[in-house]
Image (cartoon, rainbow, N blue to C red):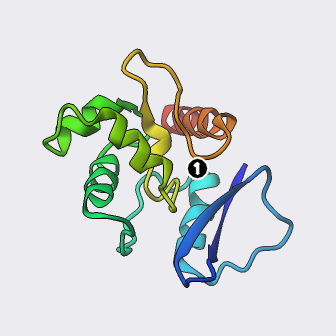
Amino acid sequence: MYALIRKTETGMTVVDLVDKRPETIALSHPWQKALDRYFKGELQKFTIDFPVPGTDFQRQVYHATCTIPYGETRSYGWVAEKIGNPKAARAVGQALNKNPLPILIPCHRVIGHDASLVGFGSDISYKIWLLRHEKKTREKG
């Protein structure tokens, strides 16, 4: 699995998850360089100052999600409580489903209240892969 940075027709920067790393990539974008290091297991926390897209609610959800430590998970309810709206777990899930910057905004770290791996804007197998990658990298270091 790998992630590529691209601009949409409206000019918004997004991250696309793909099955494997392409043979050649333009690493000129600083986020792409950081993602490359993430997949090599060299980067565990993104310190890139990026504008977070979305509504005020979505930005609150994205900010709270960014506080989840590498290799750990939290529930949608936890995120809802973190933003001061404990009954908004479903709305948190909907906001994360629209996350245009997966991995940079680590929505894969958010799971169901019963620890089930639910709700991912991309293929759920990507969420599983990302969580395993982080666990394995964390155990090494």
Mark 1 falls on what kind of element? loop
- Of residue 130 and residue 59, the one placed in the foreground of this image is 59
Residue 101 vertical position relative to residue 122 in the rendered view, above or below = below
Q: Which quadrant of the view contains residue 80? A: top left
- Of residue 43 and residue 131, the one placed in the foreground of this image is 131
Instruction: Give coordinates of residue 40: x percent, y percent.
Output: 64, 54
Number of disc labels:
1
Residue occupying the point 62% across, 78% down: 8
Per the image, the residue denoted by label 1 is: 41
Residue occupying the point 66% across, 78% down: 27
Residue 25 vertical position relative to residue 94 in the rendered view, above or below = below
Q: Is residue 135 left or right of residue 51?
A: right
- Of residue 112 and residue 85, the one placed in the foreground of this image is 85
- Of residue 131 and residue 97, the one placed in the foreground of this image is 97
Residue occupying the point 42% across, 44% down: 94
Instruction: Give coordinates of residue 6: x percent, y percent.
Output: 64, 75
Q: Is residue 50 left or right of residue 25?
A: left
Tag 1: residue type?
Gly
Residue occupying the point 33% across, 56% down: 58
Q: Residue furthest top?
A: 114
